[in-house]
Amino acid sequence: MQRLTIASLSLLLLLSISCEQSRDSEEVSFIILQMNDVYEIAPLEGGKVGGMARVATLRKQLLAENPNVITTLSGDFVSPSLIGTLRYDNEKIAGRHMVEVMNALGVDYVVPGNHEYDIKENELLKRIEESEFKWTTTNVLHTVNGQSVPWTQDGQPFPDHIIHSINGVDIAFFGSTLPFNQAGYVSYTDKYESVKATYEKVKEDAEIFIGITHLAEEMDDSLATYFVPEFDLILGGHDHSNMKFNFGDVLMTKADANAKTVYVHRVSYNKSTKKVQIKSELININDGIEEDADVKAVVDKWVNISNQSMATMGYTPESLVMTTTDTLDGRESSIRYKPTNYPIMTAESFLFVALSADLAIFNSGSIRLDDQLTGTITEYDILRSFPFGGGIALVDLKGDVVQRILETGTVTNVGIGGYLQLANAEKKSDGWYIKGAKLSNSKTYKLALPDFVMGGGEANLGFIADYQSQSQAPDTFNGIKNDVRDIVMAFMRSK
């Protein structure tokens, strides 16, 4: 057997190192940390889940693994939140706390969600200018003096795409938002065609193509299947439950709302084969992850501000209201379309305090949680569910009027905030039943309902205001303040 000389061994070693270096130079890898629909900066469910300071710790761990980490948030963050409805520095907070925490965490890119337009125009403009992260969109425009113009950040229009370069490989990010919120200062172009047109414009400028979308699941499916099947990945939002689907060759993922989970995507690109590989992992954000001290300091600042504000309102945010193994569903995608346990419980709470009432109705849009509750339910959870509060009224109405209300609220108003959730009222094959007995048009029923609805403020239910003069709205019910938050808390505690 021929022995290898030292020179031969050295040559083999050099060839091995050269091949390894060649492979290294051909492979480019990076990590995407994906969040969506984050309204809460602090941990929830008694501190067990969520918390942006924990996400910050995870991000630092990922940076130690790979210096190329891109952190994204797929819409809905400046609103809705309880803290956002409170005041600080003589103005409404309106998402200021979220932007400050996201800056501290190190978010890179965001797409606007539909809830970004819940706040006032001047408030949103401030939040954009405070953002150290970049906003991108292909289809959302700013309406100024009746004209649709691009939104701007630091004096520059929101880009319709962002090119992020890593070691000679260009990654193109595209944003799209469903046109759900029709605020007067915002307008939209087509959520699909806008992305397709932008892709066609820049498809020769990048190797990897990623959507950051705030669309419903079926819309992401359509986008990937019919409009931009060349996408490698869609970082989705709007739906509040985690999911992972392949639409053709396109991977689409969404995490759970409020950073209860996040997605981590480990992406590699081979320059020779031009192949993209993605390994995606859903990470639970829970009390097993230490809170990053720097981000926690920012979170604590805003929590303290909100706690002081709530204390002046007579509430103790961390006070226990109820412990439950059920999941109370307060998501808009549920409560505005079908009978759902949390708003039904709210209607039932009206009957708990208004003992003389025959039935109760509750307009789903009054729940601003857009999330689910389970485990330990605190006063803070109730306050963030009903940030605007408001009392309830009692009114005596003939059966034909009651039937008109029920039909309008459960048929005409499907899909909007005026969709009514009911207590002691049920529709069967032969008509409506109240307290188990068939509704009589000539009989008088005592109805409990929110003041807002009694005043005709809800869509398609304005006719109720015709009976407002004969309604009553007491200040208290047996010592319970006439405020939906106090009423729901009392009902839950009774259970």
Image (cartoon, rainbow, N blue to C red):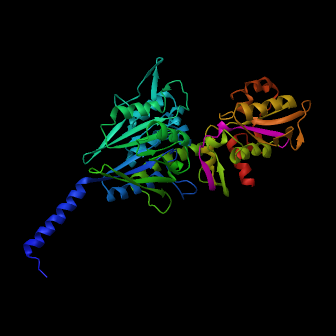
Image position, residue 361 (x, y; %): 76, 38
* Quadrant of the drawing holding the N terminus: bottom left
Q: Is residue 279 left or right of residue 12?
A: right
Q: Residue at x 23, y 54 (%)?
A: 25
Q: In this orientation, does residue 138 appear?
A: no
Question: In this view of the protein, which residue sits in the foreground, 151 or 165?
Answer: 165
Above or below: residue 80 compared with residue 13: above
Image-based side of 14 in relation to 236, left or right: left
* Residue occupying image coordinates x 49% and y 25%: 187
**Magenta run includes residue 278:** no
Q: Position of residue 56 (x, y in %)?
A: 41, 53
Quadrant in the picture for residue 161? top left
**How many numbered marks are there?**
0
Q: Quadrant of the C terminus?
A: bottom right
The x and y percentages for residue 426 are: 81, 41
Q: Residue at x 63, y 54 (%)?
A: 377
What stretch of residues is rendered in magenta? 355-376
- Residue pictured at 59% horizontal, 50% vertical: 317
- Residue 182: quarter of image: top right
Relative vertical location of residue 261 with respect to residue 181 in this rendering, above or below:
below
Asked whether 357 falls inside the magenta stretch, the response is yes
